[in-house]
Image: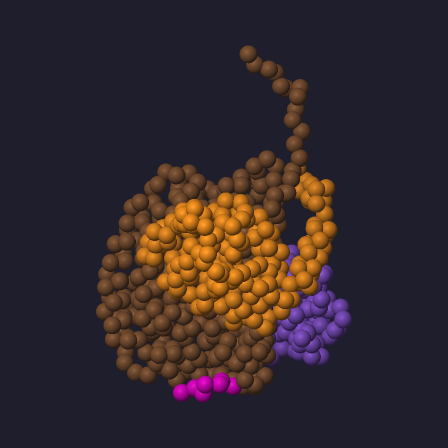
Chain colours: A orange, B brown, C purple
């Protein structure tokens, strides 16, 4: 069948492009400030009910030992993440060998790569689609502050302009050992949270 | 009991499916709007730019040496080749001659990088074919050995920043050559192991043979280069046609194939790994002693002019076009994007195939989004 | 070795066919006028002795008074190469004919030049932005973009 005619009937491309461009401009205008990090857990008072403490401990152990990551791999840090999954630095021993394509089934987003303004609405959409409780590890210098590309016209200076970040792992790219250290820190954070309070 | 349905013809319409930027099988943030009729692909429209970091504009704001780390991140799977092409372009502009030992080290690094890149290319291709992670992890085992060698010389695992204008940044340590000899001795056995497991594998043959064919004339017309061109029957390799560095001193063959389908590209990459091992062996025997870097000031100021240098990078022809106006930063730096130009033919290659074949054809082109978007 | 043909050699053959189309020809390159670019390109591709069937790259540079678009062509059969340049003196709406009909590899590269420099190519089937989004203000690679 006539392809050109069919495309015109379904979606005029120019309309789509213009709408997407407007979405990007909107996200750019609203994200000039930094979203504050959720680090209230660091100063929390540790007084809790005995019953809830055991329940908390069980739930937290379950959550932190089986974090499933959502696939969000823009750039070079992705290869260090894949190497961390590989046979030498095995992430499977932390329960994390699953990489879920669907954000509904994931609870951890490891942002491995530079974020550009064109990609920003998509990352925010994926983050919004993940179910609570969810955590974010910002991996690499580009994810923390824009890295080596910070002064470019299309690069967002850090993922915390778009989504709240829990753990920052520096490096360009960070070694798989550094990434595993960051994951352990996140597991410590999850161990301290309570089902009553939101941390 | 059958129902005659000759009179009830189903009316079908094409629809547009978005293979979004976040997708498990697109090697990075690549987006396609595919027009489908059921499962058959009618047309695709690629959308790029999700990793466009403005590297060409940043080149005008960094010194020539300060731009080398940025070139690492172009095709981040094969950083040594990017570095090599860029420093060769600056050396051509400034008329700097590189010492012998540095040339041999560069050739060894470039060929090891070619092997590492083809391991990932074939591993991901088999991943897309459905062999979920087993060949990929096998090939990663070898790639870790190569990365160990690279870490010995440069300290980094992925983006090496090793080449400098006039040579390499530091000499190879004493334990490098024995470790390299050990690697070169056992690697051909591993390539044979992959061949034994995969060459006549029924599923691979059924999925990849005859799929995504591109003819000789069309490949040349689209500007495609690298293993894809050679798999279509054109025996063209920049290391032979226009030898740069010291490639005219080594003996190696150029593997080609005749059909131009996905299976042929897979075979060409396997054979190229063997030829690279041959080059590394010869270079190891001939490497002389001497300085590893020419006497070049840290802030290089080439005279005004322009230069284009291309090399045979693992993915194809990678070139840097540099314009200088006698200052410490480049006036204009353009990267010839291998992967973007290789993608030009994707539209013709996938018309008429199904969605699953689209993923395989796309995987066999072996692109890297850092180079497409820059 | 790939022989880099000098502009002077090729200019001799082109002068008779395209009078006035060539602006300069020196050791390294051949500078042509924008209008005669398409004719000269098809001549370079179709003549059997030249047979430039492979387009290496297209790129554009912003010198302040003009834009210069650079094409490098290679012939796989004869193993020689040539650099052709075209100039646009218009700053607001620069335009050049597109060579997509001759070399399909020019498709994405011309879109990139339009996106980042603002030079549009007449005859291109899909002339729109490729890396940046519709509605991005300005053309980043120009020298007057901040």
Viewer can see residue C21: no
Where's residue B189, x and y in %? 25, 54
Where's residue A186, x and y in %? 44, 58
Q: Quarter of the image containing the N terminus of chain B?
A: top right
Task: Answer with the quarter of the image where residue C23 lies.
Answer: bottom right
Residue at point 44%, 80% (across, down): B165
Magenta residues span B295-301
Residue at point 56%, 60% (across, down): A164
Residue C6 forms part of the magenta stretch: no
Viewer can see residue A50: yes
Residue B296 forms part of the magenta stretch: yes
Where's residue B287, x and y in %? 28, 75
Residue at point 35%, 79% (across, down): B170
Q: Is residue A31 left or right of residue A101?
A: right
Q: Quarter of the image containing the C terminus of chain B?
A: bottom right
Residue A20 or residue B307, whichever sits in front? A20
């Amino acid at each position: 069948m006539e392809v050109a005619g069919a495309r015109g009937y379904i979606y005029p491309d120019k309309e789509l492009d213009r709408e997407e461009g407007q979405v990007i401009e909107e996200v750019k205008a609203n994200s000039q400030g930094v979203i504050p990090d959720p680090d209230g857990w660091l100063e929390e008072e540790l007084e809790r009910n005995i019953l809830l403490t055991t329940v908390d401990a069980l739930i937290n152990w379950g959550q932190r030992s089986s974090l499933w990551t959502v696939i969000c791999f823009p750039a070079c840090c992705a290869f260090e993440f894949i190497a961390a999954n590989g046979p030498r630095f095995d992430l499977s021993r932390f329960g994390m060998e699953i990489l879920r394509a669907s954000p509904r089934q994931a609870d951890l987003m490891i942002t491995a790569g530079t974020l550009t303004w064109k990609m920003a609405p998509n990352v925010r959409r994926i983050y919004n689609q993940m179910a609570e409780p969810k955590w974010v590890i910002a991996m690499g210098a580009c994810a923390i502050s824009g890295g080596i590309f910070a002064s470019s016209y299309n690069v967002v200076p850090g993922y915390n302009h778009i989504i709240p970040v829990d753990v920052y792992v520096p490096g360009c790219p960070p070694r798989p050992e550094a990434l595993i250290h960051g994951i352990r820190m996140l597991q410590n954070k999850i161990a301290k949270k309570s089902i009553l309070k939101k941390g | 009991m059958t129902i005659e349905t000759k009179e009830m013809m189903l009316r079908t319409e094409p629809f547009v499916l978005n293979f979004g930027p976040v997708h498990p099988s697109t090697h990075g943030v690549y987006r396609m709007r595919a027009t489908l009729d059921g499962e058959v692909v009618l047309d695709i429209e690629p959308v790029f730019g999700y990793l466009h970091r403005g590297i060409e504009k940043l080149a005008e704001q960094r010194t020539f040496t300060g731009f080398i780390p940025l070139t690492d991140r172009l095709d981040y799977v094969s950083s040594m080749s990017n570095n090599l092409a860029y420093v060769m372009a600056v050396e051509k502009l400034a008329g700097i001659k590189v010492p012998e030992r540095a040339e041999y080290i560069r050739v060894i690094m470039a060929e090891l990088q070619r092997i590492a890149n083809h391991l990932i290319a074939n591993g991901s291709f088999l991943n897309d074919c459905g062999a979920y992670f087993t060949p990929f992890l096998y090939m990663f085992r070898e790639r870790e050995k190569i990365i160990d060698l690279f870490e010995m010389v440069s300290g980094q695992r992925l983006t090496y920043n090793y080449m400098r204008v006039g040579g390499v940044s530091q000499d190879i340590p004493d334990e490098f050559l024995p470790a390299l000899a050990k690697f070169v001795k056992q690697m051909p056995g591993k390539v044979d192991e992959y061949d034994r497991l995969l060459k006549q594998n029924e599923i691979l043959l059924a999925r990849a043979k005859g799929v995504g064919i591109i003819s000789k004339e069309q490949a040349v017309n689209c500007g495609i280069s690298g293993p894809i061109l050679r798999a279509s029957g054109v025996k063209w390799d920049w290391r032979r046609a226009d030898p740069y560095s010291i490639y005219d001193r080594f003996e190696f063959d150029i593997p080609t194939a005749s059909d131009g389908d996905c299976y042929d590209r897979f075979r060409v990459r396997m054979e190229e790994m063997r030829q690279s091992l041959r080059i590394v062996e010869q270079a190891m025997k001939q490497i002389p002693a001497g300085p590893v870097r020419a006497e070049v000031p840290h802030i290089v100021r080439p005279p005004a002019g322009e230069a284009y240098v291309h090399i045979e990078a693992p993915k194809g022809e990678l070139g840097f076009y540099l314009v200088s106006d006698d200052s410490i930063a480049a006036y204009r730096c353009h990267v010839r994007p291998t992967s973007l130009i290789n993608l030009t033919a994707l539209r013709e290659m996938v018309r008429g195939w199904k969605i699953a074949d689209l993923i395989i054809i796309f995987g066999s082109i072996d692109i890297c989004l850092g180079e497409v978007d820059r | 070795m790939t022989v880099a043909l000098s502009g002077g050699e090729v200019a001799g053959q082109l002068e008779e066919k395209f009078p006035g189309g060539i602006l300069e020809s020196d050791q390294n390159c051949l500078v042509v006028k924008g209008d005669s670019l398409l004719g000269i390109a098809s001549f370079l591709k179709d003549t059997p002795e030249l047979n430039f069937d492979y387009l290496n790259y297209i790129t554009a540079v912003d010198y302040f008074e003009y834009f210069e678009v650079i094409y490098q062509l290679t012939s796989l059969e004869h193993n020689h190469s040539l650099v052709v340049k075209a100039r646009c003196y218009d700053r607001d709406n620069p335009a050049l004919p597109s060579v997509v009909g001759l070399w399909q590899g020019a498709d994405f590269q011309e879109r990139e030049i339009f996106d980042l420099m603002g030079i549009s190519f007449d005859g291109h089937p899909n002339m729109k932005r490729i890396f940046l989004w519709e509605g991005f203000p300005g053309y980043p690679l120009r020298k007057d973009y901040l």
